[in-house]
Amino acid sequence: MIDKIALLHVAYPVGMGLAAFGCAIGMGRAITSALESSGRQPELYGKLMLLMIIGCALIESLAIYTLLVPFILKAI
Amino acid sequence: MLSYQVKSVYDKLKYMLSVALLSSCSSALFAAEEAESASTELPSFVSVFLDLKINGEMIRSTPFGHTIEAWSAQIVLIFITIVSIIFMLRVSRKLVVKQVPDKLQIAMEMLCSSIKGFLFGLLGEHNKKHIPIFATFLMFIMICNMSGIIPFLCAPTAKYATTVTLAIFIMIYYHYFSFELGWKHVLMHLLNNPSNLIMWILSPLFFCVNSIEIVTRPLSLSLRLYGNMMGKDMLLGIFMIMGVQVTVAMIPGTIIGIPLHFPFLFLGLLLGVIQALVFTILSAIYLSLWTTHEEEEPTNSQEQKQQVEAQQAVS
């Protein structure tokens, strides 16, 4: 009915877009709280930036797992 | 030409132009590789070596060439390691204490003391012996990631083989040291230390989740680093190819392209540093989670106690 490869060519970008959507919401909340706390207590800016970057890298890795699926499946 | 010796605007323009030219040369290499080979390959000095011809055929098509092509990223890794070992030997040979030290010694001492302080705050007093290995990981991964931007070198962490090796190594490392307190401590940690009846009922659930986490933690570490570095290479590669296509459209037959990928080099630099930091911080946190003693309090209050004691000693 539908060509399987064509279906994958539609599914991978849609999946990546959904993953990026969720990650953007999560990272927006994390960065918002980091910036607000930095405004309240400016002397903690270094620690807050470090924690924010670690949190953002953890959330971003979920989108990267979705990005890697086509490359890994192409090799197999 | 070191960056702090650049004085006039003309010097700055020359510096940026040389960087752009070097990037565009590497862009030509990548575009040529992309056109010839079926799989996207990271160009490096190994690819230049493979494109040479012996007896009328390229080294790449010989069996010896196939082996070198498969191991090209690891050859670059060995080269990076040898260069950094030579650099560290030169730094550590002429250390002076009583006279005025030279700039290299001051810079290296600043680097070492900042990394040591940062990791000490992360690991704590009783894990102090693990600071050297995490510092090694941090510097190694940072240098490997930054080699993706240097022309004629590739980032070895952009191949899954390198990152999965690092992740498996750190997994074996912290599981070995988690058995320091005995196998009963490890079992209780896998069951989340049940104290009352409800927690004992829920403990099989925790056992399943924690034992799956034994596998997924190194997996996530390796995939995060690999995905970031490979994605950066893909991004740079696509823009490099676009740059070459622009000049080929204007002047047919050129091999040098416009460095359209120039802004993404800075993004790659930032990502490389951040991912090295995240890898080290997560490994250190996993280690300290597995090696907590129950009678000791977590690290932050230890720091606060030390600070309070220091203030009391001063006053």
Image (cartoon, rainbow, N blue to C red):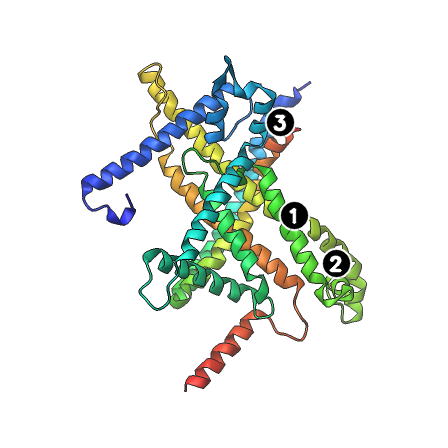
Q: Check disc 3: other Cα within 10 Å, few if <14, some if 14-19, many if 20+.
A: few
- Distance (Cα) linking label 3 and label 2: 36 Å
User: Residue A2: x percent and y percent?
Assistant: 66, 20
Task: Say left or right for A43 vs A30.
Answer: left
Under mark 3, the amino acid is Leu
Q: Which mark is residue B206?
A: 2
Task: Say left or right for B190 vs B56.
Answer: right
Quarter holding the C terminus of chain A is top right
The residue wearing badge 3 is A8
Q: Is residue B278 above or below residue B67?
A: below
For image coordinates 58% across by 19% down, the residue present is: B62
Under mark 1, the amino acid is Ile
State whether discs 3 and 2 lie on one chain: no
For image coordinates 61% across by 74% down, the residue present is: B297
For image coordinates 31% across by 16% down, the residue present is: B251
The residue wearing badge 1 is B168
Q: Nearer the viewer, mark 3 or mark 2?
A: 2
Under mark 2, the amino acid is Phe
Query: Is label 1 in a helix, a strand or a loop?
Result: helix
User: Residue B35: x percent and y percent?
Assistant: 48, 20
State whether discs 1 and 2 lie on one chain: yes
For image coordinates 63% across by 52% down, the residue present is: B170
The foreground one among B148 and A71 is B148
The foreground one among B44 and B298 is B44
Disc 1: host chain: B
Q: Nearer the viewer, mark 1 or mark 2?
A: 1
